Image (tube, rainbow, N blue to C red):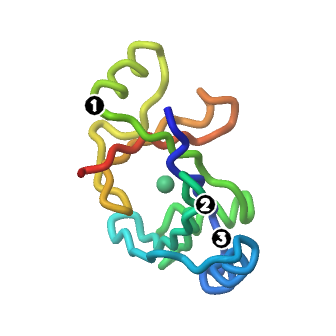
Amino acid sequence: MKIEHIGIAVDNLEAATKTYSTLLNTQPYKSETVESENVETVFFQTGDSKIELLGAINDDSVIAKYVEKKGEGMHHIAFEVDDIHAELDRLRREGFTVLNDQPKEGADNKLVAFVHPKDNHGVLVELCQGKG
Ligand code: CO
């Protein structure tokens, strides 16, 4: 599986976008709001992978809760798969806790689902499949 992107939870998306623009010496190639998650995202291309900055758009956002509890920082690693349904079935059979019954629409025109961090030694894992 290729690392498609790394998600980073931030408190202030505008400030974080400036920081990462300077750090990576490039401008973000897109920003997108995921209404269902109450999250605003900003994407940077880094070689074959991406950095996804995640900011809360209101207090109901999982990102608001995450930042409040754990502070800013790495939120998830996303792996790209060809067939997300097959891969989720495989992981369920292997005993992993998949947090979504069905893959859902994520940012960047992808189907996404998450695997519980407790099964991955503390790392929230996202599987994603491009919708082509
Ligand atoms: Co992601």
- The amino acid on which the numbered mark 3 sits, given as a three-letter code, is Val
Name the disc covering residue 131, or none.
Answer: none
124 with respect to 85 (left or right): right
As measured in the structure, the alpha-carbon distance from the residue carrying label 3 to the one carrying label 2 is 18 Å
Residue at x 47% of width, y 16% of height: 95
Residue that label 2 marks: 46
- How busy is the neighbourhood of tag 1: few (under 14 within 10 Å), some, or many (20 plus)? some
Coordinates of residue 43 in the picture (x, y in percent): 51, 69
Residue that label 3 marks: 10
As measured in the structure, the alpha-carbon distance from the residue carrying label 3 to the one carrying label 1 is 30 Å
The answer to the question of whether label 2 and label 1 lie on touching residues, with beta carbons closer than 8 A, is: no
Coordinates of residue 74 in the picture (x, y in percent): 68, 55
Residue at x 51% of width, y 38% of height: 2
The answer to the question of whether label 3 and label 1 lie on touching residues, with beta carbons closer than 8 A, is: no
- The amino acid on which the numbered mark 1 sits, given as a three-letter code, is His
Lower sequence index among marks 3 and 2: 3
- How busy is the neighbourhood of tag 3: few (under 14 within 10 Å), some, or many (20 plus)? many
Residue that label 1 marks: 85
69 with respect to 37 (left or right): right
As measured in the structure, the alpha-carbon distance from the residue carrying label 2 to the one carrying label 1 is 27 Å
